[in-house]
Image: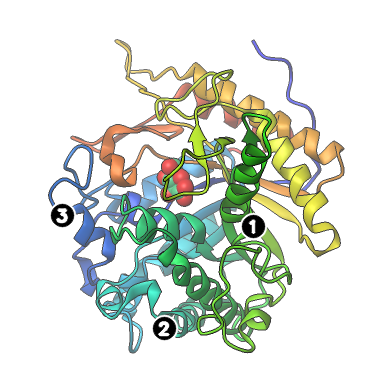
């Protein structure tokens, strides 16, 4: 038994999050084109279990059941992503109406269930033809992204309640183009900086495109990881600052009008006159995706990186071996407030969650006490941050369903709902029931 959850402000947004390629499947339906993740997943040796997102959770066909699961949970919002290759199969040109039809129906079903649609425009599934033309290393991709934002908002702008331009541009840059462990699998290390700049430029251009089509608020979702410096030498502290500049500030400083942190993006041929103004277009909400803090110390001589990442021992760990550190969320929210002050817009936690090896028991139930403890701790951390004076407006659990976890394939389960990938049977875990009761206490009459 945990202590009763403290109260949250009236109107606090309770949500769940997913992304297109991780759940939809139906990758060939209605003229959808290939994305970099189709190509990557189908390349031998890239995904831990050799799986792909071809079917994933088959959400494209089962979204009715999934919306019913959300309604049963009582959430007030659902953050999903729109697959760019469904809207523009080749990454350019007119919209593919059949691709947008799916999202049109989804949005209407959500509204009918009393759930706010929160749409991310880009959760890493770049149309492959754009990658073939240089991907996010090419400046033109920023303009293509704004065009896609315009086409999508022309169809859905009257009903989506919150728009999120990009999901985690730092992770797309570092894992996709820097280290090669995510699509498109390029290993450019610091030569990947143009990927950050062109995504942020695309974000700024997309904000303008969205404003022309909708009055709904606009946000971006960044991944943040508070930095714990291990070691007390100047070199350790410098390593911590270098990591913080990359992970936490590279994609936030320029958004909030400060330009790029020293030692990061600084090539005048890349950052052209006026770009920083486009990027700093006001946003209404900052989406914060938080999973864990990062331990950092000085790198060994000869390392290609200016820091070394070190495991943080004093925390329990998830099946991903990530430390469970709710205190890191409170710390992060305070850091954002202290660092950006009045420039910081209201925050929504757009992702927070954990992977465990959840297995149905003999009665077909799926007990996941670790996830309950995780969510309990992180919600209390948000409550503490509210008490600290940080303006947090919502919390979205990653994720509604177990799903296709990128390079880990189906081996990591993040869902409140268990998915049997052989049958596509959905079974709410004990965390689903727990969260339903927490939400019901905060939003009387919410669950349907
Ligand atoms: C991503 C999700 C992913 C989650 C867990 C986040 O960085 O936005 O797509 O599933 O982390 O790894």
Residue 144 lies in quadrant: bottom left
- In the rendered image, residue 303, in percent from the top left (x then y), is placed at 42, 45
Q: Earlier in the sequence, mark 2 or mark 3?
A: 3
Disc 2 from disc 1: Cα separation:
25 Å
Disc 3 from disc 1: Cα separation:
33 Å
Q: Secondary structure at mark 3?
A: loop
Q: How many marks?
A: 3
Q: Which residue is pictured at 58% across the width and 20% down the height?
A: 373
Q: Nearer the viewer, mark 3 or mark 1?
A: 1
Q: Which residue is pictured at 36% across the width and 57% down the height?
A: 176
Pointer 1 residue: 249
Residue 121 appearing in the image: yes
Q: Earlier in the sequence, mark 2 or mark 1?
A: 2
Pointer 2 residue: 144
Left or right of 214, for residue 124: left
Answer few, some or many: residues within 10 Å of disc 2's Cα (few below 14, many 20 plus, some between 14 and 19).
some
Answer few, some or many: residues within 10 Å of disc 1's Cα (few below 14, many 20 plus, some between 14 and 19).
many
- In the rendered image, residue 42, in percent from the top left (x then y), is placed at 15, 54
Q: From the Cβ of disc 2, is ligand 1 less than 8 Å away?
A: no
Pointer 3 residue: 42
Q: Which residue is pictured at 52% across the width and 43% down the height?
A: 307
Compare residues 49 and 231 and report the one nearer the observer: 231
Up/down of 279 relative to 353, above or below: below
Disc 2 from disc 3: Cα separation:
25 Å
Left or right of 196, for residue 125: left
- In the rendered image, residue 318, in percent from the top left (x then y), is placed at 46, 25
Q: Secondary structure at mark 1?
A: helix
- Is the C-beta separation of discs 3 and 1 under 8 Å? no
């Amino acid at each position: 038994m945990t202590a009763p959850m403290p109260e949250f402000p009236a109107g606090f947004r309770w949500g769940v999050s997913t992304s297109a390629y991780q759940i939809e499947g139906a990758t060939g339906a209605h003229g959808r084109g290939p994305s970099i993740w189709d190509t990557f997943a189908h390349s031998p040796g890239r995904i831990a279990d050799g799986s792909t997102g071809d079917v994933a959770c088959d959400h494209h066909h089962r979204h009715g059941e999934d919306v019913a699961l959300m309604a049963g949970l009582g959430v007030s919002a659902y953050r999903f992503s729109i697959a760019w290759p469904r809207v523009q199969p080749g990454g350019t040109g007119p919209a593919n109406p059949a691709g947008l039809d799916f999202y049109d129906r989804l949005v209407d079903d959500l509204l009918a269930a009393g759930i706010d649609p929160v749409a991310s425009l880009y959760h890493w599934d770049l149309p492959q033809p754009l990658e073939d033309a240089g991907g996010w290393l090419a400046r033109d991709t920023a303009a293509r992204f704004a065009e896609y934002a315009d086409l999508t908002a022309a169809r859905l702008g009257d009903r989506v309640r919150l728009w999120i331009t990009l999901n985690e541009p730092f992770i797309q840059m570092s894992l996709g183009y820097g280290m090669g462990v995510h699509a498109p699998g390029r290993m450019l290390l610091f030569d990947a900086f143009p990927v950050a700049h062109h995504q942020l430029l695309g974000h700024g251009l997309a904000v303008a495109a969205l404003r022309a089509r909708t009055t709904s608020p606009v946000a971006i979702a960044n991944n943040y990881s508070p930095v714990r410096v291990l070691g007390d030498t100047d070199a350790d502290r410098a390593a911590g600052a270098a990591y913080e500049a990359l992970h936490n500030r590279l994609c936030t400083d320029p958004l909030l009008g400060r330009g790029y942190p020293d030692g990061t993006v600084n090539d005048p041929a890349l950052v052209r006159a006026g770009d920083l103004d486009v990027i700093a277009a006001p946003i209404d909400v900052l989406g914060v995706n938080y999973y864990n803090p990062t331990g950092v110390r000085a790198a060994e001589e000869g390392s290609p990186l200016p820091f070394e990442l070190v495991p943080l021992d004093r925390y329990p760990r998830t099946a991903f071996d990530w430390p469970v550190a709710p205190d890191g969320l409170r710390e992060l929210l305070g850091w954002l407030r202290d660092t950006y002050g009045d420039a910081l817009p209201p925050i929504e936690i757009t992702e927070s969650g954990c992977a465990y090896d959840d297995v149905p028991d003999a009665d077909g139930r799926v007990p996941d006490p670790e996830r309950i403890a995780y969510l309990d701790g992180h919600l209390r951390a948000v409550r503490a941050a509210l008490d600290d004076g940080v303006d947090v407006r919502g919390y979205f659990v990653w994720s509604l369903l177990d799903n296709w976890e990128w390079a880990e394939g189906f081996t990591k389960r993040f869902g409140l709902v268990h998915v049997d990938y052989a049958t596509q049977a959905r079974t709410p875990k004990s965390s689903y029931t727990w969260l339903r009761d927490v939400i019901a206490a905060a939003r009387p009459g919410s669950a349907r």
